[in-house]
Amino acid sequence: MKTRPKPWRIQRILKWTGVVAGVLLLGVYWTSAHFHGIWFNRTGTITVLIANGRISLFHSSIATNIKSESGWMIFGAPLVRYAWSFSHTVAPGRMRNIIVPLWAPFLLMSAVTAVLFYLDHCRIPPGHCRHCGYDLTGNVSGRCSECGTVV
Ligand SMILES: [Zn+2]
């Protein structure tokens, strides 16, 4: 048994984390056109709105609306549509609004995940176990002697 650490294992975890995160993002993206979600902090200085395929962050330096608690509010949206564009506005009274369309993080995540998949695919040279990368030269059993995978 090999005892040395396997750095590609982290890469494999990241790769699948990317897939899961991508699927979750797509789910949020789709859901956001049917249900809007609002998160706010207690002092009312930060509000996060997920709606119509975009995530919108409002920040105000003045505490306006003191609430008893912070948290999520989800409500059904009457109009199903997607907005695509970025936006950044600074209003008088030190109010700031940043809007990021959810396709942007999805695209970024997909690109990184695709690269990780590609690197993982190239990692194992021919004649090595597809599962663990063990050198199968001279192996006639048809089963990897390192991890037991049928080859
Ligand atoms: Zn193996």
Image (cartoon, grey):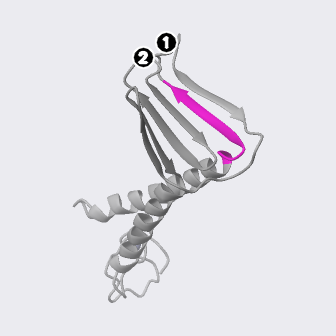
| Frontmost residue, 143 versus 26 | 26
Q: CA distance from mark 2 to mark 1?
A: 7 Å
The residue beneath circle 2 is: 63
Q: Image quarter for residue 62?
A: top left
**The residue at label 1 has a CB less than 8 Å from ligand 1:** no
Extreme residue in the right direction: 78
The structure residue drawn at horizontal position 50% and vertical position 77%, both measured from the top left corner, is 150
Task: Please identify the quadrant where the N terminus is shown.
Answer: bottom left
The structure residue drawn at horizontal position 35% and vertical position 83%, both measured from the top left corner, is 136
| Frontmost residue, 61 versus 142 | 61
Under mark 2, the amino acid is: Ala
Looking at the image, can residue 84 be seen? Answer: yes
Could you tell whether 111 is left or right of 34 in the image?
left
Could you tell whether 20 is left or right of 3 in the image?
right
The image position of residue 141, as x and y in percent, is 44, 83
The range drawn in magenta is 31-40
| Frontmost residue, 95 versus 151 | 95
Magenta stretch, overall SS: strand
The image position of residue 20, as x and y in percent, is 52, 54
Above or below: residue 57 compared with residue 135: above
The residue beneath circle 1 is: 66
